[in-house]
Each structure stands twice: as C-alpha cells, then as structure tokens.
C-alpha cells in the first residue's frame, strides 16, 4: 500500500512540474521576450513579424536582411498602430480586362502616424520581370500634403540595392523613375515619404512593358489615371502596364 501511495505521489509531482514549466513559458511569451530570428540573424518582435508577413508576404522574413529591417524601422512598429493595404495584379483602367495589368506584381501601402504620418509603399515581383527598363513609382495626395521633403525610392534584388534621384514632384503628388536591374532576381521596388494627417494617399507602381528611356518615363502628370496616380503622355503613352494602385487614409 505504501509503495502504491509513493508512486501516485511521484506522478502528481511530475505533473505539477510540467504545469509549472508550461505557465512559465507562457509568461515569457506574453512579456514579449520571445523573438523571431531568421538565418541572417535578424530579430523581430511578434508585432514586427506580423507586419512583415502582411506587408511583404509570408515568405519574405526568412531572407530578410538588417538593411530591410533598418528600412521599416521608420514606422516605429512596436510603438505605433500600423495599417497595411495590399493589391495583387489588376487593371486600374478597366477592372474587367485581362489584357493589361500584371498579376505578377504585388503592391502594398502602410502608414504609421504620430504627429505626421510615415507612409511606405512596396512593389514586389512574384516572378522575375522580363522587360527591365525604367519603371515608375509614386503617389497622389488628396486632402493632405507632404510633411517633409524626404522621398526615398529604391530598387532591391539579388544584385544589391540602388536608390533613385530621378524624381518629378507636383503640388498634388510625385513620381520617381527606377531602373530595374539587368539580371537581379527577387526584385522589390520601395518608396518612403511623410505626409500630414488628413486626406488620402494613392500609390502606384507602373511597369514598362517595353524598353523606354529615362526622359520618356518622366512624361506624366499626377492625376486619377494609371493606378490612380499617373497620367502618361507623349512617348510614355502605351508603355506602362496599368497595374492597379492602392490607397490609404491618413
């Protein structure tokens, strides 16, 4: 009988230790000390990890670099509320058309407001582009204005990162010409800028479906045209794919 009681006591003790360990692990997670770490040693909090999956796609984190992390740090994700909207493919001029509009592209917009609103736009290729010429990324501002003169535009691939200074600014928005890398894979085009609260930001990435020049890529006005942002004219007419844009209230 004593032996049986001893066995029961040991079982209860073991169960108690297991329950204590489970509660302790849960508390560590709740306190936010558990981080996601990828093969490059980049560490994200739970909130940052969720943002990266939503903004870039759920296969981006594993290859994320410190440079990628530094880029999104301007959103101050752990302290601020961040909103994200995403569109894949689509035709901004004719939603029913399958002739134009590139289903191989994914465009997202994110905002984080604290006094002024930091806005990030990400255009990611889901396959590798065939035509690699001068594409255009930009925004139309309705009911809001730029809070700073900072507009940063970049293109990143396995060939590295390049920043573009080929910017055309109007009173109601702006666009930057970006040259796609000749041979780089996993192409991502991004833009960052600050706006004042109030109104709506419309963002668009337009891909050149045939080779063009830098000067031709700047032949646009800002308006409710391609992607809700670009009205192309002259040598830029018929060059771009009319990919749908995204918008977000600020």
Image (cartoon, rainbow, N blue to C red):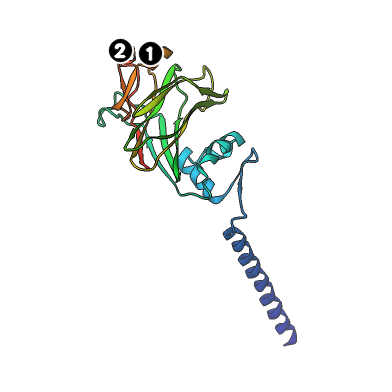
- The residue tagged 2 is 234
- Corner quadrant of residue 30: bottom right
Residue 176 in view (yes/no): yes
Q: Quadrant for residue 175, please give it.
A: top left
Give coordinates of residue 208: x percent, y percent: 39, 19
Tell me what residue is drawn at x 52 percent, y 16 percent. Answer: 182
Q: Position of residue 56 (x, y in %)?
A: 48, 38
Vertical comparison of 107 with 175: above or below: below
| Left or right: residue 175 compared with residue 67 | left
Badge 1 or badge 2: first in the primary sequence: 1
Spot the residue most to the bottom: 1
The alpha-carbon separation of the residues under discs 1 and 2 comes to 8 Å
Q: Give how far across and how far down residue 33 sits, in percent.
A: 62, 55
Foreground residue among 236 and 7: 236
Residue at 53% x, 40% y is: 74
Residue, disc 1: 216
Quadrant of the rendering where the C terminus is positioned? top left
Q: Do the residues bearing badges 1 and 2 touch, measured as CB atoms within 8 Å?
A: yes
Query: Is 69 on the left or on the right of 197, as rendered?
Result: right
Residue 15's place in the image compared with 193, above or below, is: below
- Crowding around mark 2 (Cα neighbors within 10 Å: few <14, some 14 to 19, many 20+) is few
Q: Which quadrant does the N terminus fall into?
A: bottom right
Secondary structure state at the residue bearing disc 2: helix
Q: Secondary structure at mark 1?
A: helix
């Amino acid at each position: 009988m004593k032996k049986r009681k001893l066995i029961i006591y040991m079982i209860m003790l073991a169960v108690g230790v297991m329950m204590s360990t489970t509660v302790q692990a849960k508390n560590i997670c709740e306190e936010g000390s558990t981080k996601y770490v990828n093969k490059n040693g980049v560490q994200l909090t739970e909130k940052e990890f969720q943002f990266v999956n939503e903004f870039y796609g759920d296969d981006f984190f594993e290859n994320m670099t410190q440079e990628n992390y530094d880029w999104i740090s301007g959103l101050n994700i752990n302290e601020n509320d961040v909103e994200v909207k995403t569109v894949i493919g689509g035709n901004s001029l004719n939603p029913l058309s399958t002739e134009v509009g590139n289903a191989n592209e994914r465009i997202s917009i994110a905002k984080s407001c604290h006094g002024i609103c930091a806005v990030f736009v990400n255009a990611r290729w889901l396959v590798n582009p065939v035509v690699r010429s001068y594409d255009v990324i930009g925004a139309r501002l309705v009911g809001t204005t730029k809070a700073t003169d900072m507009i940063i535009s970049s293109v990143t691939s396995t060939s590295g990162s390049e920043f573009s200074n080929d910017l055309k600014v109007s009173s109601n928005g702006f666009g930057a010409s970006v040259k796609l890398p000749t041979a780089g894979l996993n192409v991502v085009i991004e833009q960052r800028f600050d706006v004042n609260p109030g109104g709506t930001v419309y963002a668009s990435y337009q891909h050149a479906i045939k080779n063009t020049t830098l000067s031709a890529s700047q032949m646009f006005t800002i308006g409710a045209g391609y992607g809700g942002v670009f009205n192309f004219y002259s040598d830029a007419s018929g060059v771009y794919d009319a990919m749908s844009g995204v918008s977000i209230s600020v």
